[in-house]
Image (spheres, rainbow, N blue to C red):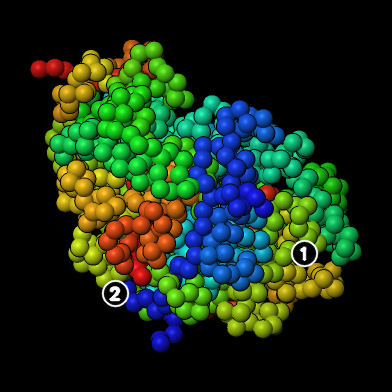
Amino acid sequence: MPSLPRVAIVGMGYEGFTTSSEHLSFREMVFQAAVKAYEDAGGIDPRRDVDSFISCQEDFWEGVSISDEFAPDQLGAVLKPLYTVTGDGLHCIANAYMMIKSGVADVVVIESHGKPSEIASMRDIIWFSTDPIYIRPLKIPNPHALQAIEARIYMESRKLSREDLGLYVIQVKENSLLSVRAPYSHRLTIDEYLSSDYIADPLTIHDIAPYSDAAIVAVMASEDVAREYTDTPIWVEGIGWATEASTIQLRSMEEDIATRIASDIAYKYAGIEDPKRDIDFAEIDERYSYKALQVVEALRISSKGSITSDLRDGFFSRSGSLPVNPSGGALSEGLPLEAHGLARLLSAYEQLRGIAGRAQLSDIEKAIIHSWRGIGTSSSVVAVLSR
Amino acid sequence: MTSYIRGGTPLSDDEFKAVIKEIDRPKARYNMAAGIAYSRFLEGLKKGEILGTYCPSCRLVHIPPKIYCPYCFRYISKWVRASDEGKVVTAVISYLSATLEKLEKPEIIGVIRLDVPGYRFTSYRFPGILHRICGASEEDVKTQRIFDARVKARWLPPDKRKGSITDIECFEVIWG
Amino acid sequence: MKANIYVKKRVAIVGAGMTLFRRRMLETPQELAWIATRRALDQAGLELKDIDCVVSGSAPDAFDGVHLKGEYYSEGAGAIRKPHMRVYVGGGTGVFVAIAAWWHVASGLCKRVLAVAEEKMSSAADPHPQAVFRHIWDPFMEKPLNPNLIWIFALEMHRYMHKCGVTKEDIALVAVKNKRNALDNPYAQAAANITVDDVLNSEPLVYPVNRLDISPVSDGAAALVMVSEEWARRLTDTPIWVEGIGYTLDTSYWTNRELSYPVYLKNAAEMAYKMAGIERPMKEIDVAEPYDPFDYKELHHLEGLGLAPRCKAAEMTKEGVTQRNGDLPVCPSGGLLGVGNPIAAAGLMKVAEIFWQLRGEAGKRQVKKSATTGLAQAWGDLMQIGTVVILRR
């Protein structure tokens, strides 16, 4: 039996990473991103060359029931196979990976977009994702409080101080000064960080990613055809995803178990035995500063016992041995809702292709990308990429 | 365990009301950007014009308009003005409101295929919109007389228009 | 899809389960999902710990009243601490869950997959679950007209009637057939012995649609266990192979196209037939479960699937071809019209029904002819998507 084909990213494009985007409808934003992605993929023609399209979106972020309805036209997917996955953009990458491995598709296009600037009742929508019997009736004013509880538990168990969280935030914000798409980039000082007001203790405004609007499209292809579209395919060596209990009190708040399970699967298929040694950099979810550290542990590029010292020793800085979010992550780019995972993929893709501009790292072969989905969820996707 | 054996526990309307624990009405409010294409279209409606975009590759006029042709996947930027006349592609009689309550007066709804002077389309792809139809009776619909009937937009007076699809009150049948 | 489909791994269904479909159930979404998955696991002879991946489907989040509801019902679907993927293509979801589950196994990543579909429409209680459908419209072109959902189906139905010369009487025969078939379905909500006149005299909603032309609103769940070839042979003597999958989405601008014939379904079916090696569907498909939320849709879909010549499905129905003892039994389960329409669960129920039919386990619903190849199909969004699955014994 012939071995299953490898899967590659052959093109990506995006529009946005701005605080608002009133001049374009979401369809027009996706169209712009798609045009750029198809150009990057060697001028691929969606009407002829693409076997399937996948959209990652959720009704209540979009403001329409059955958001799948509005997906095809702007991608060039009319009368073609297209479906929606209700998940982060990386869930779409996972499906494309499976479709290509199964032999049923050679070229798959993925899109995800977020226009949080258009959601006027964001807080209500976030609460709407929580358990209607056990959480919502508590009428807690601020949804970040749920994550603040988790932050407190995590920090106490790992003996992390506020200064430690501040160290992480300052580091990634500084990285983002090199980014071309970081509307929330600053050079932050520890004094500035420590003197800011809490949103929900221990989280300050600097610990929580603000929102931004973005549309991101990726083109994936099987090994057989990847070289028709690009000289620099970026391989998806392995991908895993997992879900834990969504209601916060029913799962561990110390460990990000969903990320651990997902990364175990990804590492297994990618043949990674020691991620600390084999991985060169990581693009992970940092929509809450403490979450990034939880994730780093779960990905086994640090551990419960060493996270505090690894952080303080600069292990994850751009000049460290395993840079985390080398051009800043969601804290500086903003959070484009379910498109966040594709934003992480985009950064890793640019790095591995050597087109990351001033943020370019050198001597890199393998990366991990990771995304969560935010409050009300405990689902994560992890993938190992290589060039 | 017994609910598993039975396959679930059906309830009557009253039994259901008795077991409701929480009632929630989500506040889901969005300010959606119309974007380039719809903005111009809506501005056009305010002026009493129905506008569309034209794709030179497949020669289709897109109404509702878009800045891309979904069939050719290319950027399009030529705007054309449709007539406010057309013909009925299909029509129905609604006895219910949007929330499924009985309407006092039934209304006739249809898909109207618009004329665009100088352009021709097939019956498979054409500029068409959903709207109310006036000047027709229930009989006209039930006998299918209304199919292919010519219609013309009945506009609200200019000072009442807001830049919305409802600036057109309905499409009036021109019986000939 | 790909021009040369070389599928390396075979996938089979080894168990299926469902809850009752009823207008209102006591169970929460998690509990409904649990009942269906537990039953599917029982039939497959597996436990939850044997499952390595879960694929689920559920239609609008607004029904259950929870945003990101895939996360919410995960625990009932057996997805905690497992890879969980929720897919969503409107009404097409139920059959699409089986399609996505297929590549979970065919990719080699998963060996024993749980496919679950759950819908709790009764939660959207005020004023009526149908009100949720106020938000499926284009916010600029359609919503300001205050449409109700039935408009679009009535518009499509009337166009079909006009183009094909099909009458309401012809169409009502489908509702009569399916509700009668449902009398033999222990899960059914709307089984009944009705006549064509009953349908024509039922409350007019949006002409030409009357109340009995439509399937009811329901709560319910259905589940399948789908495994790799190696596991299929270990677990059962009669695995039912998933031989073909297909899906296609048409433009969201449904007012710009001919509604009397579902081109998107033709494309989806062709994809599935090609993969399954089927060249003459009318001859090679033994039993079919096309999506029938409205009676005219069964006819519309039979034509799109190539199981009836264009505009001829009504004739076939009149001649009795689509009865359980006919040459091409259609909706032997009773369909959505008879069993109920908890959207995503209804689609997966159709796949389960074909599974049971091909195994000879459909009890009183068993079709007369010997069935080796069956088809299940669903449809959704703004009349845009066709999802097709072909099963073979």
Q: Residue at x 16, y 17 (%)?
A: B174
Position of B148 with respect to A126 (left or right) is: left
Quarter of the image where one finds residue B35: top left
Q: For residue A255, which numbered disc appears in the image?
A: 1
Task: Tell me which amino acid carries mark 1.
Answer: Glu
- Chain ID, mark 2: C
Both labels 1 and 2 in a single chain? no
Q: Is residue C148 visible to us here?
A: yes
Q: Where residue B153 sits: x, y (%)?
A: 25, 20
Task: Tell me which amino acid carries mark 2.
Answer: Asn
Q: For residue C272, which numbered disc appears in the image?
A: none
Q: Residue at x 26, y 54 (%)?
A: C325
Nearest the eye: B106 or A379: B106
- Secondary structure beneath dot 1 equals loop
Q: For residue C4, which numbered disc appears in the image?
A: 2
Quarter of the image where one finds residue A35: bottom left
Q: Disc 1 and disc 2: Cα gap in Å?
A: 45 Å
- Chain ID, mark 1: A
Position of C210 with respect to A342 (left or right) is: left
- Secondary structure beneath dot 2 equals loop
